[in-house]
Structures are given as structure tokens and as C-alpha cells.
Image: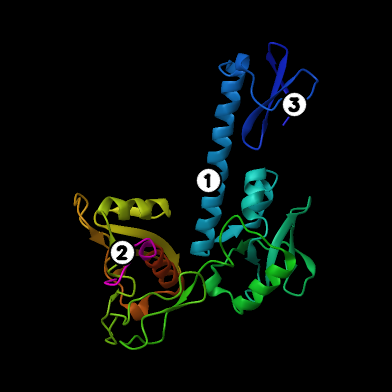
Amino acid sequence: MAWLAAGEGYEITLEDGRVAARRAGGRQLKTLPKALRDSPEVDRLRRLAEWLDRHAAACVAQVDAWMVSSLPVPTELITRVWPDEAWRAALRDMAVVGDDPDEVGFLRDVTSDGELKVVDLDGETVRLAPRTVTIPHPVLLPDLDDVRDFAADLGITQKVEQIHRATWVRPDRTDRSGGAGGTDGPGAGHPTATATATATATATEVRDYAGGKFASRFGLAARATGLGYRVSGGYATCKVRDGGRSTEASVWIGEPYWDGESETGGLSWHDGDGRAVRLHEVGPVAWSEGMRMAAALYAGRTIEEGGDA
């Protein structure tokens, strides 16, 4: 950003989200001079910095929503927003799929002709111009481990957690010995010895991450909102569009106005009309995201120490 005149013989600019100052045409100062701290010019720059932070967060949230729901995104939209630094940071290096669902590549740039420059899994830079692209949820990516290894070789970093996102795969059947799911990412494993999902065709709840104790319901709710989940009534929830239908995963966190100890409850899924979805009917993305939410809440539980723990 250019240096702007701020009076008193100073110039100001935004640098890494903060207001920086210098004597006109001179060396940058280490701190903001007292004479400028309450100036209108500095106040405007601070408000601009706050807006830019909100804009960057909104871009990341939108790309995350596209990825979680595997929604087709118009290529023209990507090319239009690419010049915006915040959008570019959120989109760059995301794994994308064009017309061929088996052809995965990492988005690196956009050409002046409106094409996407993508590095495919062979290490070749190719140009794509499909009408839409998909930013797939990692649970849908074939050979995810190979994709992760290739990304590491390229030095890929993502603003939106995609390829290194913890994923859970819905088992073909659930039983009391094998548990109700597995993960290939952070959060794998927990001290619960048995999963409480049953082998019946009517089962609608998973209790792998139930029983995580918290000092207060407020603390558990705060953890849920801090992780980006919605708290509604006695539940932490997340919505996913999976296979063309909307599904909401929910974990019981306690009565809203309860001020005593609380603990995580079971995980279940509901369709757009609020009906419980049987476990064997839950889609792969909805399953993974629901289990991810339940595991993340459970990870913040109170851990007992000492001989009686």
C-alpha cells in the first residue's frame, strides 16, 4: 500500500495489518508517533485494516463452505475474484477437479484468458477451462495419502484446511467391537473402549465421543463456537451438503441454561426436514464432518490426573 500524508510532516501506511508511520520521504519509524495516534487519517486506516481482516476471513469461510459441500464453482467466478489478494490467498493451492473427476490438481494461478493453471499429480502444469470446478472434500479424494505426499513435495500450504483435514470413513457396518468409524487424520483414537452404535439397520446415533466431561456447559458451548460450529438449543451443529442433499450433524452439549458440569453426548444426523438419518444412510462427507466435530469437542474435555484417574 502507498504511503499517505497524515499531517505533522508524517506519512502512514498499512503494513501486515498495522498502521506504520515515517517522516515524509524518510525512514520508517518503529512506533506510531503520539501526534498521530488519534488522527482521523490513522483512524481510517485502522478501520480499513479491520475490514480487510473481516474480508479475508469471509473469503476463507466461503472457500471452506464450497469444499465441505463439494459445490461446483464457476470458473469465471474464480478468475474474477483472483486479483483480490484475500480471495487469491484462500483459493491458491486448493485441490480442484475439472471435467474429469479423476484428474486432481492444485490451483496455482489464473491466466489473462480466464484459464486456471493447475499442477496435476504428475507434476505438470496444465491449463483448465471447464465451466465449473469442484473443490472436493478430502474424504472424496482417491489415494488421499498419495495426494498428501505429493503436496508435501511441492511445499503446498493451504489457507483452507483441505488435504490435511482429519477425515473419518463410514464403515460398511457398525458393531460393538469394531467401533463406528475410523480416521486418518489428527484426533484418531480416544479412551472409549466400545462404540455405542449398534448393528441394527435403524441405528441413528454414534457415541464414540460421548462422555467428555467439561467444568461447565458454558465452557463446552464456547469451545463449539470457537471451533466454528453453531450452538442451537442443547446441541452443537454443523450443516453439510452431501450428495445433493442437506444434512445437519449434531452433538448434545447440555441444556442451554445449565450452569453445572456438562459432558458431550451422542452424535446424530438429520435431514432437511429434521428427520433422523440412519447411520448407514449418512453420506461420506456428512459422516466425516460430523465425526470431526464430535472428536474436536471431545478433545477439549477435562482430563483427570492422579491415581484415581
Residue 22 place in picture, x, y as percent = 73, 22
Residue flagged by tag 3: what amino acid is it?
Answer: Gln
Residue hosting label 1: 58
Vertical relation: 280 (above or below) 13: below
On the rendered structure, is 247 left or right of 27?
left
| Quadrant in which the C terminus appears | bottom left
Amino acid found under the numbered disc labelled 2? Val
Label number found at residue 28: 3
- Of circles 2 and 3, which is in front? 3
Q: Magenta region: which residues? A: 297-309
Residue 268 place in picture, x, y as percent: 30, 70
Q: Residue furthest top?
A: 8
Label located before the other in sequence (2 or 1): 1
Q: Residues within 10 Å of mark 1 (few under 14, many from 20)?
A: some
* Residue designated by label 2: 251
Residue 179 position (above or below residue 205): below
Indicate the position of residue 147 as horizontal and vertical percent values.
Answer: 65, 73
> Looking at numbered disc 1 in the image, what kind of residue is underneath it?
Ala
Describe the element under mark 1 as helix, strand or loop. helix
Residue 302 sits inside the magenta stretch = yes
Q: Do callouts 2 and 1 mark residues in contact (Cβ within 8 Å)?
A: no
Q: Residues within 10 Å of mark 3 (few under 14, many from 20)?
A: some
Confirm or deny contact between disc 3 and disc 1 (CB under 8 A).
no
